[in-house]
Amino acid sequence: MSNNAYSRVRFFSGENVPLETHKVRMVQRIYLRHILDRHKVLAETGNNTFLLPNRDVFLDMLTDSGVNAMSEAQYAAMFMADDSYAGSETFYRLESATREFFGTKYFLPAHQGRACENILATAYVKPGSYVITNYHFTTTKAHITRLGGLVFETVADDAAKTKSDNPFKGNYDMGKFRAFVEKTGTDKIAFARIELGTNLIGGQPISLANIREVSQYCREKGLKLILDASLLADNLYFLKVREKALARKSLASIVRELASLVDIIYFSGRKLGCARGGGICLNDEADYRLLRDFVPLFEGFLTYGGMSVREMEAMAVGLRETLDIDVISQTPLFVEALGELLVEKGVPVVTPFGGLGLHLDASSFIPHVPQEHYPAGALGSAVYLVGGIRGMERGTLSEQRNPDGSERLSNMELLRLAVPKRVFTLSQLKFVADRVSWLYERRDLIGGLTFSDEPQTLRFFLGRLKPIGDWQEKLIAAFLKDMPSGL
């Protein structure tokens, strides 16, 4: 079944739905609280979905990071862990898995993806230097800017359009890329970066053909090219089904070619491999020696790097499972199923559907809420209020303020409803579609948010906000009228 035969099974009834390629053998109890209880929790946690206790969340769609379901083979492997501080056999098994997967020589472990970003930024970013990327990620940018570096983005203009038929909105715009390098000069460029499955613009993939172009130009100019492979699984699925030239190629050969086009690869194991940890993979000995010295300083010894050895064993298995099309298809197909349900109801979402999750277009959902009042954050509060569904704001709230204190308005105002691999059932996604479409019909009731406590760095993680006016009370009244149970 290597050609994803289960991805769309035609039912005799005519219904066309994604079919799970797994069965459930362990369950976790979840609770749907009364809307008045949800309102109380929202107030206590400052309308920040990151601060919600999971016991008060019905469907946790905050992220796919560290919450993907692991396979029975991964759990079995965890019992084989060698818990040695140095020279653990577990490390060598994981190192072997990364070599087999990417075809790279060296592997440096780290406790998660942003730890890799910290090491890479510390090694290469200098004050006034630039990192060129298709699109930034929050922690990536924070590590670069804290060291005095600057970020230049190269995605094409239509990447910021929520409605599009472009299958690879994460691509580099080569015209922008070349023009910036020619104007700036290579001496001021720390490195170029490719993010697979661009997180902040709807989980949109980048094509292998585009990566080839970027790689060739970087090698002509002597620029170091670094790949963030955290979202490789989703991007790999889209390469297979959207890039015609790759239709007959094996997933293993696609990954190997992709890896050969870059100088350094890093990833969050919370996303790639479905285990908590991360790593840096590379071939150049000089780069390896430079980066290696930061691992004991920031992470731990070279053969565990801040990771639990049990997670390392699970990661080794998870990497190999990433080469199974029926594993990597699960999130994109269920995102598509949820997206189609919402599109039928007229709810504005990002198209084409990407990886990670379904992205609601908050700017179109509640156009009356200005960006300075954080419409994606407000929509996140409203979705939790009416459904106990926890999403993640991906908009102005996730940006850093400008040096003068003014707001840096985001290119897009999105609420991400993540769909972790093999976690949710189709009935649960139908519940999400029902509550979001109910909310869309009453969207005029939703208002904005303002900060009551704003941290200086990564404010979307820890900041607290309050609603502007009494819009939440009005929304509760409308909900209780239609759903007297409050559920």
Image (cartoon, rainbow, N blue to C red):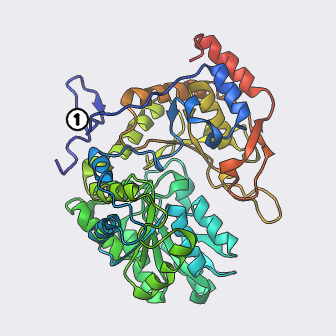
**Residue 381 location (% of width, % of height):** 65, 34
Residue at image x 47%, y 32%?
Answer: 342
Please state which of residues 479 and 104 is positioned toward the viewer in this rendering: 104
Q: Is residue 144 left or right of residue 338?
A: right
**Residue 303 location (% of width, % of height):** 41, 70
Please state which of residues 19 and 50 is positioned toward the viewer in this rendering: 50
Judge the density around disc 1: few (<14), some (14-19), many (≥20) Cα neighbours within 10 Å: few
**Residue 83 location (% of width, % of height):** 38, 61
- Please say whether residue 148 is visible from this viewpoint: yes
- 317 to 256, vertically: above or below: above
Q: Is residue 358 left or right of residue 452?
A: left
Residue at image x 30%, y 33%?
Answer: 24
- Please say whether residue 397 is visible from this viewpoint: no
Residue at image x 72%, y 37%?
Answer: 368
- 116 to 348, vertically: above or below: below
**Residue 249 location (% of width, % of height):** 21, 63
Q: Quadrant of residue 13?
A: top left
Please state which of residues 391 and 197 is positioned toward the viewer in this rendering: 391
Residue at image x 56%, y 35%?
Answer: 54
